[in-house]
Image (cartoon, rainbow, N blue to C red):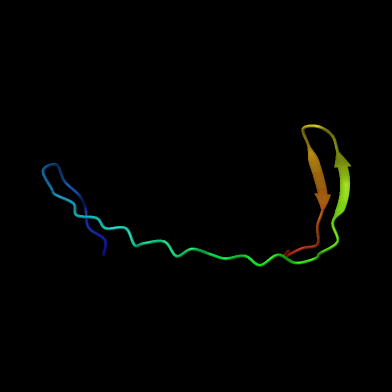
Amino acid sequence: VSQVIRKGDWLDCSVAELELLRAKPENIPINIVYEDAHVLVVNKPPHM
């Protein structure tokens, strides 16, 4: 719904409860390009 909100209008908003996502670990080789005490650079395949 699209409507212009004007001074004096009241808004009632509700936020849907977020669903917890559960990621499963995978044994994927990681290509580390550079690493030091502050930075880690990883070369990853697209869409990973």
Looking at the image, is 33 positioned above or below residue 12? above
The residue under the point 75% across, 67% down is 26
Q: Quadrant of residue 28?
A: bottom right
Looking at the image, is 42 positioned above or below residue 28? above
The residue under the point 36% across, 62% down is 17
Looking at the image, is 11 positioned above or below residue 26? above
The residue under the point 26% across, 58% down is 14
> Residue 35 location in percent, x, y?
85, 39
The residue under the point 18% across, 51% down is 11
Front residue of 27 and 42: 27
Question: Seen in the image, is 33 located left or right of residue 38?
Answer: right
Question: Seen in the image, is 47 located left or right of residue 4?
Answer: right
The extreme left residue here reads: 8
The extreme top residue here reads: 37
Question: Seen in the image, is 26 located left or right of residue 8?
Answer: right
Quarter placement of the C terminus? bottom right
Front residue of 18 and 45: 18
Question: Seen in the image, is 10 located left or right of residue 19?
Answer: left
> Residue 36 location in percent, x, y?
84, 34
Q: Quadrant of residue 15?
A: bottom left
Quarter placement of the N terminus? bottom left
How many marks do you count on the picture? 0
> Residue 41 location in percent, x, y?
81, 44
Q: Quadrant of residue 2?
A: bottom left
> Residue 6 location in percent, x, y?
16, 46
